[in-house]
Amino acid sequence: MEASLSAAKTWIGSGKAILGIELGSTRIKASLIAPDTTPLATGSHAWENQLADGIWTYDVEAVWRGIAACYASLLADVQKRYELELRSVAALGVSGMMHGYVALDEAGQLLVPFRTWRNNITGRACEALTPLLRFAVPQRWSIAHLYHSILEEQPHVPRIARLTTLAGYVHAKLCGEHVLGIGEASGMFPVDPVTLDWDAERAAKFDELVAPRRFPWKLRGILPRVAAAGAPAGTLSAEGAKLLDPTGALAAGAPLCPPEGDAGTGMVATNAVRPRSGNVSAGTSVFAMIVLEKSLSQVHEEIDIVVTPDGKPVAMVHSNNGSSDLDAWMALFGQVAKALGAEKSPDELYEKLLPLATTAEPDAGGLLSINYVSGEHITGFSEGRPLFVRNHDGRFTLPNFVRALYFASLCALKTGLAILTEQEGVVIDQIRGHGGFFKGGVTGQRMMAAALGVPVSIPDTAGEGGAWGMAVLAAYLLREDARQSLPDYLDARIASRIGTPVNPDPADVRGFSEFFARHSSGLAIEREAVKAFG
């Protein structure tokens, strides 16, 4: 669905367009949409995390440089498409990588560098918190990072005035509000889906746990205010507008919706917010969100329990390692092409090479790839070493190699989802996908369907990603009927964008099962590689 040129110009020129920004793992993206959620323009800026003193982080200055560069890219796209300057928006929203640790002092300054979701350093904290709270606390969660800092007696802890996520930090700088959307909040600390607020009983247990240390704060006093989708969450300040647009052209005053995480924007972008629906966001990391009909029977450390942006319980299976290793191999193939005098762009490489996986042997010819660039909590790794292994009789062909890379990126995800479907009896009718994994079109759908054993569909806005989903949440803030639920709003506006599903091919399903068994055995090699290759 595309807006007419005249309609788009009217929306942009009159300040009725809506802006979404998402700070992803490798790219900051902006999406400008019409009031009916039609995409109008996009912007982006590439960035990378750094391993500094053993911590995966992004420098705070890189955050603001990146946001400004992303917004400038959006302005350039608006100018190119419509010959207009973007001077105001009707609403906006900010999303970011879920979880992590942003600890701020009274002045709103970082007390320690931002610690991302990628850090698997909080194992001891999780071992204490999970039985205390009777809730599986993953290493990525903010509360795990906080208690890890407490256990290590890090000197910044008594000075914490506010604790938030990357999205919450950026949001607060734009409008001055210490608030999080409930979906993003549920990746910091457990929330109560009945009260749509922090779980008061569990917060009291945490306070009791740390009471002997006599900190000058209580947990709920430093956590953000929780807001469900559609609730107002601040107004863009003059200072905030200048952070987005250092030229000063962007007007202040636009309302902001509650900031959400990339999991929430993925659910929205794929219209997967009702029970028995699910989505997979596949890129640098891979995670599946399955909206539950009922609570799980027991605590599973491999499964996060979070909520949709409107507060419905969700089982989240999160794999730290997605496409990074595949991307590294594609870059190597690009170097090979250049050395042979046939230089190709990254898009050309992906377009030509990824579909080869569909011509490969179902099990990837006996080859094995393990894509652990970083640790993988689902399988018990705090560090990773990417590996490729083959027997002397493995069929070492390019199609098999590409399929092995694809399948490797889905094995940790499969481990977690098997717990839901086989142990908990969770029913998944269909998976909707988005993210860079699906750039290859039907190839990504087919590989995902093979791994998960369910139909996989792709919204026609999958390429827009989480920034578009965030813009849709900002548009929901402006809905005419305040009583309209988020699922009904999405059905009315984006249900027609969901493409035809690709059903799992039985041969592919069997092939993935064989590869998965090989991958599970190969993790013993990975453990030795971590020890030997420091």
Image: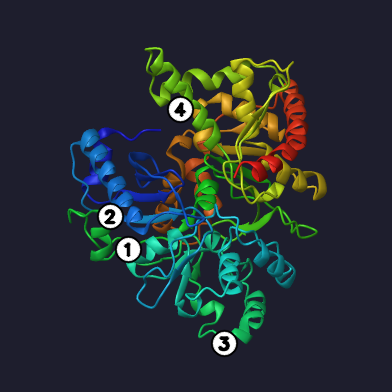
Q: Nearer the viewer, mark 3 or mark 1?
A: 3
Residue under pointer 4: 331
Indicate the amino acid at tag 3: Arg
As measured in the structure, the alpha-carbon distance from the residue carrying label 1 to the one carrying label 4 is 36 Å
Indicate the amino acid at tag 1: Leu
User: Which numbered disc covers residue 244?
Assistant: 2
Residue 429 in view: no
Q: Residue at x 47, y 62 (%)?
A: 165
- Label 1: few (<14), some or many (≥20) within 10 Å? many
**C-beta proximity under 8 Å, tags 1 and 2:** yes
User: For the residue labelled by badge 1, is the local secondary structure a helix, a strand or a loop?
Assistant: helix
Mark 1 or mark 4: name the one nearer the start of the chain: 1
Q: Position of residue 217 (x, y in %)?
A: 51, 83
Residue under pointer 3: 214
As measured in the structure, the alpha-carbon distance from the residue carrying label 1 to the one carrying label 2 is 8 Å
As measured in the structure, the alpha-carbon distance from the residue carrying label 4 to the one carrying label 2 is 32 Å
Q: Residue 358's quadrant in the figure?
A: top right
**C-beta proximity under 8 Å, tags 4 and 2:** no
User: For the residue labelled by badge 3, is the local secondary structure a helix, a strand or a loop?
Assistant: loop
Mark 4 or mark 2: name the one nearer the start of the chain: 2
Is 281 above or below relative to 230? above
User: For the residue labelled by badge 4, is the local secondary structure a helix, a strand or a loop?
Assistant: helix
User: Which numbered disc covers residue 174?
Assistant: 1
- Label 4: few (<14), some or many (≥20) within 10 Å? some
- Label 2: few (<14), some or many (≥20) within 10 Å? many
Q: Is residue 400 left or right of residue 154?
A: right
**C-beta proximity under 8 Å, tags 3 and 1:** no
